[in-house]
Amino acid sequence: MTQFTHRKNTRKVKVGPLTIGGSDEVIMQSMTMSKTHDVEATVAEILRLEEAGCQIVRVACPKMEDAEAIPEIKKRINIPLVVDIHFDYKMALKAIEGGADKIRINPGNIGRREKVEAVVNAAKAKGIPIRIGVNAGSLEKRILDKYGYPTAEGMVESALHHIKILEDLDFHDIIVSMKASDVDLAIEAYEKAAEAFDYPLHLGITESGTLFAGTVKSAAGLGVLLHKGIGNTMRISLSADPVEEIKVQKELLKSFGLAANAATLVSCPTCGRIEIDLISIANEVEEYLQGVHAPIKVSVLGCAVNGPGEAKEADIGIAGARGEGLLFMKGKTIRKVPEETMVEELKKEIDKLAEAHYEK
Ligand code: SF4
């Protein structure tokens, strides 16, 4: 079996000021739900996503009026904008002209060579990449006829077909996704893709479901890939507020040490020795940490039975102790705090650590 291409060894592809590929960084993306031509709603949604930590945002472009809205949206947002077009090359041209930082279009679906050339030349002129989005649910008929049903081999064959069209036009700023809603199929397709070419991979399990089920399903599939070093950017697709997609991605990247400036919460599983209302405290601290952009490890323990020494690797934490809390740093108790002010005290200490990190 050929060795797969580790994310660090993929090509580097620029998307606005960001680089996808060629490093261990995995860029977080999401997609808006509003109608793209509704500029107010789309911009508001993107600004919320930015605040949550989204690094690249994609908008759907089913109509020309959506493509026409791109310049105004671009003016009012701060992260790179990807425009998703299915077939219409005129919309692709309009989006590129309007300042899209990347377009998602499958060159094999555009039609005549002159149309493909027009899109590729426009992308080249602006220095923007093209994402090829292979989807198990919409493979070309000839590939389905050959394999009988969607397979990982068929998905790679489809990707290579689209890639060749671009390469023949001397275009190499390519990113590829291999989405499937079946977790095993998606894993296999991404593994084979990472063996077949070195273009950066955009990870995703498509139609994964609701916030709860979709999170589990996406984490199961993408976790395997991230662990193997596959994937340079990702979108978790949930039937939920897109901000939730970013929260899930952040947490997933943190699990693999791939989120640079994110704070992590370690909380105990609770048991009969519990001395404080740990579940609500853990939830409150977790919410607070969403806004902390420093690699701080925070621990919240229900009791001090094993001592704060249990959580030595935590930068800061609290352990419940009969109506009060022990505030500790790196395993050493620094002071006792009353239960009512415990969380506030912890937040203040977190802020101090974050400030020290920002000043570095
Ligand atoms: Fe139980 Fe205390 Fe351990 Fe939490 S820290 S699981 S309450 S023993």
Image (spheres, rainbow, N blue to C red):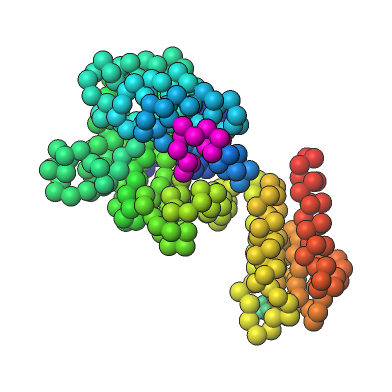
Q: Image check: 178 left or right of 44?
A: left
Position of 150 with respect to 198 (left or right) is: left
Closer-to-camera residue (218/118): 118
Q: Which residue is pictured at 76% across the width and 61% down the height?
A: 316
What is the total number of numbered labels drawn onto the structure image? 0
* Residue 178 spot, x, y in % from top left: 34, 43
Q: Is residue 26 visible?
A: no
Residue displayed at 23% across by 41% down: 139
Q: Looking at the image, is 185 positioned above or below residue 97?
A: below
Q: Which quadrant: the C terminus? A: top right
Residue 306's place in the image compared with 344, above or below, is below
Looking at this view, is 331 or 47 the one in front? 47
The x, y position of residue 11, in whole percent, is: 44, 30
In the image, residue 39 lies in the stretch drawn in magenta: yes
Residue at image coords 37%, 40%: 177
In screen coordinates, is 88 left or right of 244?
A: left
Place of residue 13 in the rendered image (x, y in percent of width and height, measured from the top left): 47, 28
| Whole-percent x, y for residue 76 in the image | 60, 29
Residue in the picture at 34% in, 37% down: 133
- What is the magenta range? 32-43
Occupied quadrant, residue 341: bottom right
Of the four image quadrants, the one with ligand 1 is bottom right
